[in-house]
Image: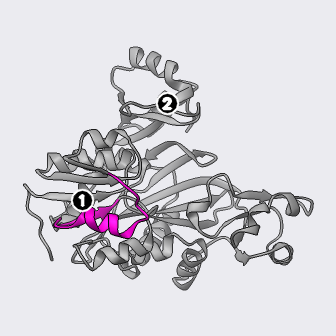
Amino acid sequence: MAFIYPRQTIGIIGGGMKSYALALTAKKMGFSVALMTDRQEPVLNIVDFPTVGDLEATEAVLDFTAGLPLVMFQDENINFQVLEALQNQTFLPQGSDILAITQDRYLEKTFLDDLNVNVAPYTTVVNLDDVRAGLASIGYPAVIKPIQKGLAHNRQEVLYRDEDIAYRTHFLEDTSAILESWVPVSQEFLIMVCKDQDQKIQLLPIIETFYDGHQLIAAMVAPRLATEVQTEIQRVAQRIAETVNYCGLFGVSFLLTATGNLYAQRIFPGTHTAADIYEQTTGVSQYELQLRTLLGWPLPKVTLQTNGALLMMLKIMEEASYTQIKIKPEWQFNYYPAAIANSVAEPIGEIFVTDDDRANLINRINATDLWYL
């Protein structure tokens, strides 16, 4: 096992707010940070060696990482071939194998299928005839989306009837797609997992997540779920962790129907915004856990100490959030640096609320009329 000592410079590939939090945590742990992203953004102002470059260009990434004792990627939105080349030059403890699974929806589904994990019925399609044949088997409603996750934003569609096939599958002209049954969701959950360099696994507390479309709205621990559902979520996460060749933090999301059917939805390499609530409810930051696994540092035992919720502040809520600051002195307000939202639906920060009484926690949040748990 490689142990990385403080006072060295470690590298992060990719930007965004999660990389911002990772960099701040790394600096607190005694490291200098080199970071490469493909655009100007706030994280470049806090790292020691900022680089703006083409993350798709193998030589540019290799030049950036040369001489660094450790390099990490923040999420799955990175070129798989670049990472494979990077592994031959520097210490990349996360590896690239997990991305071969998570960047491709079909491979992710078959990976879960092979582990006998329950997933929504699915099939691959490349043309309209495939879609019609798939719908004959899967039925309506169904969701169609590109197989490559990087192409998915604003491109997935729900098919409710035959008339939807022609005008909601336009992206089939340039990519194959996956067609899967639409799941009538009652609740959504996320479990985060730590896997260190020695392949030791620690399951973290389950989080209940709340979405509006694809935008995370809130996250809560301890979640409202039956014991048997919790046990199954933990079993699936443990099985995935034992199988995947990976070091670091990753998450698995689940959908639960009103009739009690649980479906594994997807796997997230790296940190997850919803897991920001861990620091307030367990006393340990997910970013410190991620760094510890990759640096070869031992992991603390993570246990839930209180109930808590993360509330996303969207641009449309900005004025209302200022009102909450004035009347909620016990709530923690974290605004993103230099947040310039292009849309009223984009996040500008996070609010953290804790309470030993879960029912009271929920009631206090719902009373704002801004979030509903």
Looking at the rendered structure, which numbered label has been put on residue 159? none
- In the picture of the structure, the residue carrying the numbered disc 1 is 11
Instruction: Name the residue: 36% across, 35% down.
Output: 354
Left or right of 242 in this view: 9:
left
The range drawn in magenta is 52-73
Crowding at dot 1, Cα within 10 Å, few <14 / some 14-19 / many 20+, comes out as: many
The spot of residue 283 in percent (x, y) is: 24, 46
Crowding at dot 2, Cα within 10 Å, few <14 / some 14-19 / many 20+, comes out as: some
Is residue 1 visible to the viewer in this orientation of the structure?
yes
Is residue 301 visible to the viewer in this orientation of the structure?
no
235 magenta-colored = no
59 magenta-colored = yes
Indicate the secondary structure of the residue bearing disc 2.
helix
Task: Identify the image quadrant of the N terminus.
Answer: bottom left
The spot of residue 369 in percent (x, y) is: 58, 25
Q: Which-is-in-front pick, marks 2 and 1?
A: 1
The spot of residue 56 in percent (x, y) is: 44, 64
- Residue contact at pointers 2 and 1, CB within 8 angstroms: no
Q: Residue 62 falls in which quadrant of the image?
A: bottom left
Instruction: Name the residue: 7% across, 55% down.
Output: 7
- In the picture of the structure, the residue carrying the numbered disc 2 is 365
